[in-house]
Amino acid sequence: MSLALAPSPAELVAWYAEMGITEALDETPHDHFAAAQPTSEPSRPRPTLPPRAGQSPALDARPNAAAATAPEDAAVTARAMAQEAPTLEALKEALARFEGCALKATAKHLVFADGNPQARVMIVGEAPGADEDRVGLPFVGRSGQLLDRMLGAIGLARKTDVYIANLLPWRPPGNRTPTPQEVAICLPFIQRQIQLANPDILVCVGGPAAQGLLGLTGILASRGKWSEYDTGTRRIRAMATLHPAYLLRQPLQKRLAWRDMRSLKAALEAAGGAPEPAPTARVD
């Protein structure tokens, strides 16, 4: 009988970091509720885990910097930095300087955008996943490949016909759902990104994007329905649809996403024409 080799300490630390466990609180289980009561014992410093391989030591200070900033203050700073950016490139540089969101410390890359900034359609997803965090581009994993096929089925190509971004530019540890606090802090940046890209149609992919940008709750009930989004300079048509990652888990729901794609194609044609679908395009 063969025995599996135990992971090395470095591999174990890397796994913990990937799962979002980036700080060691104690060597043994600790009752933090009891610790919140007044005590005369001096508090012990909280040791931190060593940085991951390839991670800059400077990243270690980021969680502390973000934690030291109140969420309201971080959101105010984000709004000021976003509005001061005159171009998309300047906005990307502002995001790279922003230290108000702790997700930046655990992410490998800033995931800003992909596609054509001059496109008529802008697609906004939730947040980067592991593949996106590794590459630094949105929707590049299995869900991204499905999104490309969905767009191709109505004649849209990623690099020329759409501009793709995310509600959050940094990956939440373990691919968890972004918290309302994280969304509130990062929202000014994606709002400014939409304003600068100035698309004709906004498509919010997944529940968090639909709620954060359009105020919609319940993606299954709200998907496929047209509304308006105020960019600050004009109002544009907007629609929510199901996230490709959800469709990979629930293939039967692809029929709903296909209806949304057909509705998007019809809207583009009504507003001035849309490309013909590729003969070999598939959404399955």
Image (spheres, rainbow, N blue to C red):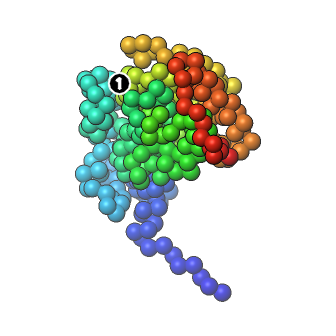
Residue 30 to residue 241: above or below: below
In front: 259, or 22? 259
Whole-percent x, y for residue 253 in the image? 72, 38
Whole-percent x, y for residue 138 in the image? 45, 43
Is residue 122 at least partly visible in the picture?
Answer: yes
Whole-percent x, y for residue 124 in the image? 49, 32
Residue at numbered disc 1: 196
Residue 102 falls in which quadrant of the image? Answer: top left
Looking at the rendered image, the quarter that the N terminus falls into is bottom right
In front: 152, or 192? 152
Say whether residue 225 is left or right of residue 86.
right
Residue 244 falls in which quadrant of the image? Answer: top right
Residue type at mark 1: give it.
Leu
Whole-percent x, y for residue 29 in the image? 50, 56
Is residue 205 at least partly visible in the picture?
Answer: no
Residue, x 60% and y 36% (percent of image)? 277
Residue 46 to residue 159: above or below: below
Residue 270 to residue 34: above or below: above
Say whether residue 17 is left or right of residue 96.
right
Residue 216 falls in which quadrant of the image? Answer: top right
Residue, x 72% and y 36% (percent of image)? 255
